[in-house]
Amino acid sequence: MTLPFILRAGTKARAQISQSGFDADSLAAFGAPAGGPKFIIQSHLDRFLFSQWLPQRKQALPAFGSSIGAFRLLAAAHRDPAAAAERLYQAYCQQNYENKPTATDISREVNKILHALLQADDMDYILHHPWLQLNLLTTRCLGLAAARQPAWQAIGFALAFASNLRARRRLATRFERCVFQNHTAAAPVLAPDAFATHTTRLTRENLAPVTLASGTIPLLMETVRDIPQAAAGVHIDGGMIDYHIDLPLHVPQADAGILFIPHYEQRVVSGWFDKRLQHRQPSHGERMLVLSPSPEVIAKLPGAKVPCRQDFKIYHGRDTQRLAAWQAALTVSEDISGAFQHLLASGSIEQHLQPL
């Protein structure tokens, strides 16, 4: 059977699947990466996972999301995840920009997406979800990156880029990780790493600004300041530190637990500044199971690529063509979802695993 996706597994994930098989209870955590409109290629898989497959679990599921991944998880935490995923897709498609949008313009459009997605009637359900443990990620800026003046901010991010170029751990002098949760875990969900990590409970007052901050692209959008109940300061895109959810999971059983990442590409990039550093590998890949569209499927999409933020420039003034390209990706996401369901039913997932 030719699948429309590739499954790549780290060493511990592959060993667990080989020994115990694979079902919803195999997961130690779920990862929703950053990536802008790339999420469209996994939209229908999200609908299946959170509406039908993952509710079968016997235990709660920690889920980590940064940037658009935080929006995906917010949709997943609604009473009707499939309907919320459709609202997210529709609202994202309806963005409209002038030739050179300002930070205010982009922030306004992203706020529209958030307000279209977040249903007030489901707020309490999201904050006390029966099994989905949200961990929404933002990045707290330090030093010049937290300045109010864009020019000083730019210098701060240039310094952060230089720090990361030397070593990822040096980025911890520029940024801190913030994790916003709708639960109180009995044990830490993350093991310590180089980054100072602040954990804050999600509330009615901070759920919207947290989600917005997690998707706030630095220098292109207005920063989010002083989130209620959180560490004071400037919060931006969670993908600056955790771009593709390469996280140090705290798993009580050393050899058990898979981090499942339905992804938009084959490569797992640790942080936003690592995108162009092809030699840099994920630090915590041993537990990952990464599902990404196959090269053959991508080659058949308009422009031979998944949707991306550059589409707003590529199709500027031609929204009908942009929406057609994105609809083609959404159709592929149906094929991915259907094939994954068939693979689960067949019990043959191990035969299709490739090394991460």
Image: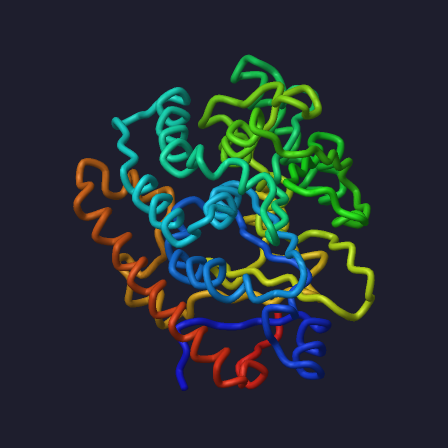
**How is the structure coloured here?**
rainbow
Q: Looking at the picture, how far across and down is residue 73, in whole percent?
A: 52, 47
Q: Above or below — where is 159 with respect to 277? A: above
Q: Does residue 317 appear to the left or right of 299 in the view shown?
A: left
In the depicted view, which residue is nearer to us: 129 or 251? 129
Count of marks overlaid on the render? 0
In the depicted view, which residue is nearer to us: 75 or 339? 75
Q: Which of the 4 image quadrants contains residue 144?
A: top right
- The residue sitting at 36% across, 56% down in the picture is 306
- The residue sitting at 69% across, 32% down in the picture is 175
Q: Above or below — where is 146 with respect to 138? A: above
Q: Which of the 4 image quadrants contains residue 93?
A: top left
Q: Above or below — where is 197 with respect to 278? A: above
On-image quarter of the N terminus: bottom left
- The residue sitting at 50% across, 43% down in the picture is 74
Q: Does residue 141 appear to the left or right of 170 in the view shown?
A: left
Q: Looking at the picture, how far across and down is residue 234, in whole percent?
A: 62, 22
- The residue sitting at 40% across, 75% down in the picture is 339
Q: Above or below — where is 42 with respect to 193? A: below
Residue at the top extreme of this rendering: 149
Q: Does residue 339 appear to the left or right of 205 in the view shown?
A: left
On-image quarter of the C terminus: bottom right
Q: Looking at the picture, how far across and down is residue 81, in whole percent?
A: 44, 52
